[in-house]
Each structure stands twice: as structure tokens, then as C-alpha cells.
Amino acid sequence: MQETISKSERTRQFIIEKTAPVFNAKGFAGTSLNDLTEVTGLTKGSIYGNFENKDAVALAAFDYNFGRVTLYMKSKIQEKENAIERLLAYPKVYRDFLKIPFLQPGCPILNTSTEADDTHPLLRQKAADALAFWKKSIENQVKRGIERKEIKPKTNPAEIAIIIMSLIEGAIMQAKVTGRSTELKVAMDFLEKLIRDIES
Amino acid sequence: MQETISKSERTRQFIIEKTAPVFNAKGFAGTSLNDLTEVTGLTKGSIYGNFENKDAVALAAFDYNFGRVTLYMKSKIQEKENAIERLLAYPKVYRDFLKIPFLQPGCPILNTSTEADDTHPLLRQKAADALAFWKKSIENQVKRGIERKEIKPKTNPAEIAIIIMSLIEGAIMQAKVTGRSTELKVAMDFLEKLIRDIES
DNA sequence: TTTAATATATACCGAACGGTATATTATTGG
DNA sequence: CCAATAATATACCGTTCGGTATATATTAAA
């Protein structure tokens, strides 16, 4: 009755952690089984002993990648109490996007969405769910802010969420492909002003 | 000395036109030579007689895809004279993004950027150049508007360009992955207000 | 410590990959 | 219309693909 983590469960986790950055950087089609064995130091037999197929690894890797971003943002958001300050965590974090090590290969939602939307239904669904989750959590922060009378009561939570996400993802794309952070800076400056504008 | 288009030149163009949508939908890694022969009805021999390799087809296909979008936007922009109305062509066009047939597989810049930024230097460069071109052309419209006294003189062209592009690309990603146009509508409504706000 | 169960490595499969040498067909200038 | 040339098709190359049956090694319970 002890709380033992089975060997395979640890290996499974190990595989996910090691392969997740590769999937995020190279995409599903661009990542080969050889990539997976190289980055883990394991053999195909070991990987296929713990996952049904390449799809299953990719799906788990996406969850892991998205989970990391979510957790990171959550910690930054919960450092503050005021709703406006909480929302400001987004431009603050994404301003330094290119410097956050585990986000070097890009935003998992953005990368997965653009590859999978026309090619991989399972991955597409995961990306869509992640996006919905993110949207809901921004909306909730806005609603909370309205309740706490920190945000203008007529503010539309869904609209704000979509604008915030659009600006972030669009700016990330530009920053990644140019290698510059200028686009990120400009977009996040703008987003900051936008958020301060809904303060009541 | 006649203005004859050689057979191979026509075939080359034919290959580009037929394969461009496939590359845009499936990405470079996700598109196989088999896809290329299927969609063209030609054989490998024919394709490799007109292109050095798969890379060369993909690069030409990107130029074609980007060229189409550019041409389309240009025509919509030049329908108007007033600078504000010209900028408004962007939200107007991208609002119906999902319904424009040749853009069904998504924005070529967005698709190519997110795939190539960490994997394919040549494609990455093409996407970066395309982005820079787009940015310049928005900036020029803004500058023109300032000169014509239709846009507030203190408006920063580079900033506006980045915001416009971020909103469009971020919203496209969301619309593509969810299959909804709500995100596009909300973001384009916002962009419209934004553009009207810089009217002098 | 022995043993049964579990987990990993090895060696291999057929198919698909990108690419090419060569044969065949189509085009075009004389 | 014919010959030279250019363009396309055929048949094949070695490699890598995702995946698996089986042997070996490791783990964990008795």
C-alpha cells in the first residue's frame, strides 16, 4: 500500500520531458523516432513499451509543454491580488519571451495549432482545448476584477481575452521568425496600455 | 526573338500553382514527393527536371502563396484613396478569412514562420522577408496618411504596423484551430476601432 | 535470495522517404 | 518533315520512416 511510482511511470515521464522540447521545435511531422531515441538515450523498444505510438508521445508532450507555460503564468499571476496587475502579468512575461529558456522553441499552442489544424485532428483538438482553457482563465480574471470593482463593469471578458491572446500570439510569431524582440516589445507596450485602460 | 514561354517554364509554373496549397496546408516536412506527384499528375522525373529538389519547390510555392495574398490585399487597398479607409481594408478582408478559398489552408507567413523558425533556415528567411515587406507596406500607408493629413501626425507607423499584424495573425491562428470565426470577428472589430482612432 | 513479472534492448519488418540515371516521348528550329 | 534538343516517364537507388516480435536485463514481491 506504499506510494510507489513504478519504473515505467518514471520512464514515461522521462520520455515526455525529454521529447517535449523537440516536438515543440520541430513539430509532429518533423520529429522522427530517431529524434526521440537520441534525445532520451533510450531505444525504440523502450519508448514503444511505454507509449502506443508516436502520436501518443506527441499528445503527452503537448500536455507537458502547455502545462509548463500554464504553471509558469499561474505563478506570476497569483503573485498579485489586484485584477489589473494580474492581467499585466501577461505583457510582463511575454515581453521576455525569447529569454525564457523552456519557451525557446516557441508557444506550444501557436506551433501545434498552425501545424495540426489541417493535418492532425487529435493534436488540433488538444491545441483548441488549450486555447479555450487559456481564454476562460483570462475571462475569469476579468470577471473577478469587475466583481472587485477594479475593472470597468462594462468590460467584455471574452473580447478582452481574444485581444490579449491575439496580440501575444501574433507578436510571438513575428519575434520568432525575425529573431528580434522589437515586435514583442511594441506589442506588449500596447497591451499594457490596453489593460490599464479597463481599470475602473 | 519572339516572346515564347518555354514548355518547361509553363510546367514549372503549373507545379508551383498546384503544390503551393499543399505546402501551405501540410507544411514542408509534412509534404512528401508523393503529394507533389499526386496533386500535379506529373512524375518525379518531371518535377526534378524543373526543380533542383523539394526545397526549391517549397521556396517557390511560398513566394507564390505570399504573392497571391499580397496581390489580393493590394487590390482591396487601392480601391480606396483615403488612408484610413485603406487601412480598414485589412480588418475588412481578414474578417472573412475563413471564407476566402485560396486562404483556406491559412496565412502562408504564419504557417511557414512557425514551422521553419527552428528547422528550415531558407524558408525561415523567406517568411521573415515577407513579414518585413508587409510591415513596410503598412508603414507606407500610414506615412502617406500623415502626409495627406488624414492620420494624426504623431502616429508611429512602425508601431501601428506591428499591432495590426499581431492582431491579424493571432486571430487567424485562433480561428483556424477552433474552426470558428468569432475570434476573427472580435479581433477585427477591435482593429477597426483602433484604425479609426488614428484618424486626424 | 529466488522467482515471477515487468521493463528495456536487439534485430528486424515492409513501406515510404527524397533523389537520380536512363529510356522514352514531345517540342521546336531549320 | 526531319533532326536535334528539350522535357517527361520509368525504374530504380540507398536511407529513413514508424512499428514490432522476441530476447535480455532489471525490478520488486515473497
Image (cartoon, coloured by chain):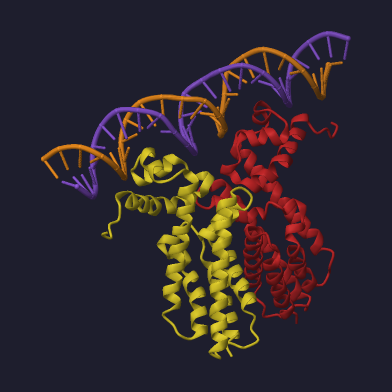
Chain colours: A red, B yellow, C purple, D orange
Q: Residue at x 84, y 31 (%)?
A: A1
Tell me the quarter of the picture where residue B44 sits. Answer: top left
Question: Is residue A86 toward the left or the right of residue B182 in the image?
Answer: right
State the image coordinates of residue A136 (x, y, percent, origin top left): 67, 63
* Above or below B78: residue B31: above
Res. B31 in view: no
Residue A31 sits in quarter: top right
Q: Please count the marks in the image.
A: 0
Residue at the (60%, 34%) spot, across then down: A53
How far across and down, in percent of the image, does residue A126 sit? 61, 50
The quadrant the C terminus of chain B occupies is: bottom right
Query: Residue at horizontal 60%, vertical 37%?
Result: A32
> Relative to B128, does residue A102 appear above or below in the rendering?
above
For the residue pair D30 and A76, the one nearer the viewer reads as: A76
Residue displayed at 53% across by 44% down:
B29
Residue B140 visible in the displayed image:
yes
The x and y percentages for residue A105 are 68, 51
Q: Quadrant of the N terminus of chain B?
A: bottom left
- Please tell me which residue lies in front, A163 or B42: B42
Residue A90 as seen in the image, left or right of residue A80: left
Q: Position of residue A24 (x, y in %)?
A: 65, 48
* Looking at the image, residue D2 lies above or below residue A78: above
